[in-house]
């Protein structure tokens, strides 16, 4: 008796192990999710760096402007000292007049205006620079009502590019305030502090410049 076996062809499929893609196949769902996650994290990191860079650039710009405005404050007060000393009858009379102007009193009892706890701010709208007779002495000084002199915000004139209180052109708030603080060291020495404040984002910043002015004779 003969026994015949019929040979059959069967197709076997191999189930891939986890994370292994068979040759010629596509991406698994897990691989796709991982790829998307990595891509998203990369984009998020890049956006964070760009945002921080823009913020740092804006801060640097405002700090540079604030530095110039603070230096300008020193220059105005020093110009006033020089004018009083040079154009008064005597240098001592000019020095006394300068201290009276900025502190509304003379050393050692100066305690008001720029020598007050909050200091003062100045407005140059009354100054006529074509007047050769001590024009800077017309500089208007006003008492600050708060430590950051919020009652005297600087305006920006887009027509001239000037910061101050000039009403020509289009004036808008510059976001800066400037405070002048006077401390009389002794009868012949006065220290001037020029502080500029500004707000950026959620923080308030300031920059302070100082200079000692002396009673001198040319």
Image (cartoon, helix red, strand yellow):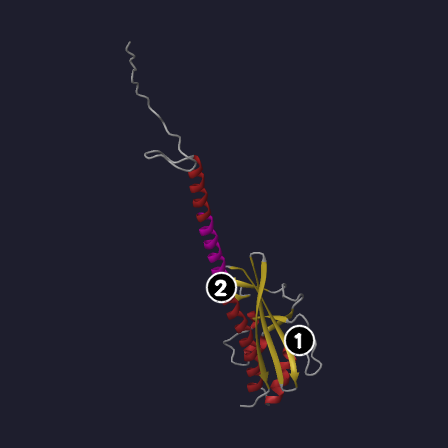
Q: Quick check: 160 left or right of 4?
A: right
Q: Residue at x 51, y 75 (%)?
A: 129
- Which of pointers 1 and 2 lies earlier in the amino acid sequence? 2
Decide if residue 197 is on the left or right side of residue 45.
right
Q: Nearer the viewer, mark 1 or mark 2?
A: 2
Label tally? 2
Residue 79 sits inside the magenta stretch:
no
Determine if the magenta segment contains residue 52: yes
What segment carries the magenta color?
A: 43-60
Tell me the residue that label 1 is attached to.
115
Instruction: Kindly identify the residue that appears in the image at 66 percent across and 77 percent down.
Output: 103
Q: Under tag 2, what secondary structure?
A: helix
Q: Is residue 1 above or below residue 12?
A: above
Q: Is residue 155 above or below residue 194?
A: above
Indicate the quadrant where residue 201 lies.
bottom right
How many angstroms separate mark 1 from mark 2 (CA)? 31 Å
Give the labeled residue for mark 2.
60
| Coordinates of residue 180 in the picture (x, y in percent) | 61, 72
- Say which quadrant the N terminus sits in: top left
Name the residue rendered at 49%, 60% in the picture: 56
């Amino acid at each position: 008796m003969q026994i015949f076996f019929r040979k059959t062809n069967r197709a076997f499929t191999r189930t891939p192990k986890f994370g292994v893609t068979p040759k010629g196949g596509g991406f698994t769902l897990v691989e796709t999710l991982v790829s998307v996650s990595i891509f998203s994290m990369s984009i998020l990191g890049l956006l964070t760096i760009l945002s921080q860079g823009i913020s740092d650039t804006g801060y640097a710009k405002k700090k540079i402007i604030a530095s110039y405005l603070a230096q300008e404050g020193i220059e105005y007060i020093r110009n006033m000292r020089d004018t009083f000393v040079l154009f008064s009858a005597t240098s001592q009379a000019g020095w006394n007049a300068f201290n009276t102007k900025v502190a509304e009193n003379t050393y050692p009892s100066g305690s008001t205006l720029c020598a007050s706890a909050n200091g003062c701010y100045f407005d140059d709208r009354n100054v006529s620079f074509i007047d050769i007779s001590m024009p800077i002495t017309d500089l208007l000084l006003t008492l600050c009502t708060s430590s950051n002199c919020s009652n005297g915000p600087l305006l920006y004139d887009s027509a001239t590019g000037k910061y101050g209180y000039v009403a020509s052109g289009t004036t808008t708030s510059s976001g800066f305030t400037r405070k002048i603080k006077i401390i009389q060291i002794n009868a012949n020495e006065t220290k001037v502090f020029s502080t500029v404040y500004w707000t950026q984002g959620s923080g308030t910043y300031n920059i302070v410049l100082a200079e000692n002015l002396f009673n001198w004779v040319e």
